[in-house]
Amino acid sequence: MRKLFNRFRFMMKIKRFIPFLRDYYLSAEVPVKQKVIPLLLVVAYIFIPIDIIPDFLSVFGILDDLTLLTFLLQRMVRIAPPSIKEKYELI
């Protein structure tokens, strides 16, 4: 549970997370399939007009978008190579 909380805190510090994403996508250690799937899911979610909770419901509509984004980013952190996790103190 503590590890999950630390990762969530890391994602909220966007200045540190953007370089992590750059290193993740430029790393030769991460298979291409694991790089492409999160991108495709985000693009599909943006372009498909169906939303879990409509955005016009104010905070609740945005909450489901943030939940999906957090889920995808957590998965990326989990499958990132140990060298990248060590660099950003995620171990």
Image: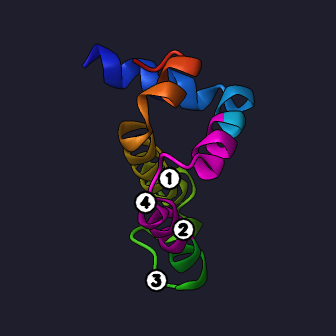
Provide the residue designation for mark 1: 69
Extreme residue toward the right, this view: 15
Left or right of 71? Residue 18 is right
Q: Is residue 88 visible?
A: no
Distance from Cα at disc 2 to Cα at disc 1: 8 Å
Q: Dot 2 lies on which element?
A: helix
Residue 84 appears at what percent x and percent y? 53, 29
Q: Reply yes or no: does residue 40 show up in magenta.
A: yes
Provide the residue designation for mark 3: 50
Work out whether mark 3 precedes mark 1 in sequence or the reverse, and give the earlier one: 3
Provide the residue designation for mark 2: 42
Provide the residue designation for mark 4: 34
Q: Quadrant of the C terminus?
A: top left
Q: Which range of residues does the magenta coloring cover?
A: 20-42
Callout 1: 10 Å neighbours few (<14), some, many (20+)? Answer: some
Q: Dot 4 lies on which element?
A: helix
Extreme residue toward the left, this view: 1
For residue 19, above or below residue 45: above
